[in-house]
Image (tube, grey):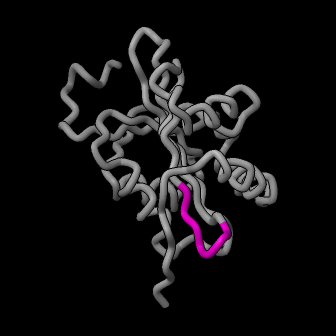
Amino acid sequence: MNEEYLIKKISFWDIPKVVRMYEESSDELKRKFHNPPPLSSIGLPHQYLSTTFLKPLLMIRITSLVAKKGDEIVGYTYINERRYLKEDRKDFGIMVKEGYQGKGLGSKLMAEILKDQDDVWLTVLDDNESAIKLYEKHGFKFESMMVMRKMRFKTHPVHEKDRSK
């Protein structure tokens, strides 16, 4: 069964629905999504401001997409661009609502948000095997591991000297 989803840029009015989707998720899904910065108390103002004309002025710029089925938000993805570090850094995250996973929606969201991107990072719990497979399918490569895997997406091949970063 091929379900139709609308994938679009997040709007100011979508944000409370995304927060609600996260809050109503199971503890296991929250653990796997591990406190997404754009939905934290510090990041949420940046998420709202990133939907306005002020986005170019922000030190933390968040590009987000939502997937909707009818009026319901069933997926959320973001790239959190931090411009205040020594080097700019882009971190990626994605969440698909329970009941909608395993149907290709995460892959569609990733393909859309990673268009025209280069050098994007993510962290993933080592036991989240389905997510790791999805990330690898979309070009993320293993970089390092502590409790979580750190993975990196680059449109250009990673050279040996880049691995020390």
Q: What is the residue that sits farthest to the top in this orientation?
A: 86
Give me the residue at 22% from left, 19% from top. Answer: 161
Give me the residue at 72% from left, 34% from top. Answer: 40
Q: Is residue 82 left or right of residue 75?
A: left
Q: What is the residue that sits farthest to the front in this orientation?
A: 53
Q: Position of residue 35 (x, y in %)?
A: 70, 39
Q: Quadrant of residue 151?
A: top left
Q: Is residue 71 above or below residue 111?
A: below
Q: Quadrant of the C terminus?
A: top left
Image label count: 0
Along the line of sight, which residue is nearer the eye, 30 or 7?
7
The region drawn magenta spans 66-72
**Most prominent secondary structure in the magenta stretch?**
strand
Q: Is residue 88 above or below residue 71?
A: above
Give me the residue at 54% from left, 63% from top. Answer: 67
Q: Is residue 124 above or below residue 21?
A: above
Q: Is residue 49 left or right of residue 158?
A: right
Give me the residue at 81% from left, 59% from top. Answer: 24
Q: Position of residue 111 (x, y in %)?
A: 36, 57
Q: Position of residue 19 (x, y in %)?
A: 74, 49
Q: Position of residue 50 (x, y in %)?
A: 55, 34
Q: Quadrant of residue 155?
A: top left
133 drawn magenta: no
Q: Is residue 43 left or right of residue 163?
A: right
Along the line of sight, which residue is nearer the eye, 87 or 27?
87
